[in-house]
Image (cartoon, rainbow, N blue to C red):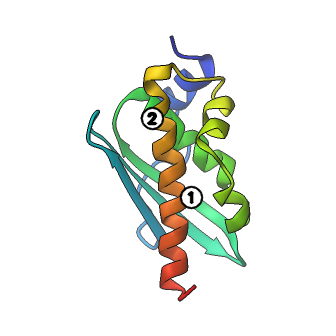
Amino acid sequence: MYSAKVLDHFRNPRNMGEMKDADGIGKVGNPECGDIMYIYIKVKDDRLEDIRFQTLGCGAAIATSSMITEMARGKTLDEALKITKKDVADALDGLPPIKMHCSNLAADGLRKAIEDYRKKQGK
């Protein structure tokens, strides 16, 4: 059902934990399944210097959160905004159709964190 990459990111999540001094925070959730995700970003010279997450949800939600942090770290804000739900799912070697909404959460959470940062910067 789940790929080896999904299971690895679920069992060994990367970049998990709250970031107390985040420059931007994105909070997203899915009321249908109860998943809640926070994406925290630290920006330096328009690049994602650090990115962390906290997710309460299923294994796929945790795996997609972990994967998007790996994909986005070091990218410019504009590059990070181009990461799609399909990119996240593809990087995990696919998700079951019933779990595709989890990759939406990760991409949406990253977008919201960048929007929050830019709003705080007056952009």
Q: Which residue appears farthest toward the bottom when viewing the image?
A: 122
Q: Which residue is mark 2?
A: 101
Q: Quadrant of the C terminus?
A: bottom right
Rendered location of residue 84, percent (x, y): 63, 45
User: Would residue 23 be found to the left or right of residue 34 on screen?
Assistant: right
Identify the disc placed on residue 90: none
Using residue 102 as the reference point, say whether residue 8 is left or right of it.
right
Mark 2 and mark 1: span between their CA atoms? 21 Å
Could you tell me residue 38's position as x and y percent? 40, 54
Say if residue 24 shows up in the picture. Answer: yes
Is residue 91 rendered to the left or right of residue 36?
A: right
Instruction: Please state the horizontal and vertical placement of residue 32, each as a whole percent of the image.
Output: 27, 35
Q: Amino acid under label 2?
A: His
Amino acid type of the residue tagged 1 in the rendering: Ile
**Quick one: which residue is furthest to the top in this view?**
1
Q: Which labelled disc corresponds to residue 51?
A: 1
Q: Secondary structure at mark 2?
A: helix
- The image quadrant that residue 82 belongs to is bottom right
Quadrant of residue 35 in the image?
top left
Q: Is residue 17 above or below residue 46?
A: above
Q: Secondary structure at mark 1?
A: strand
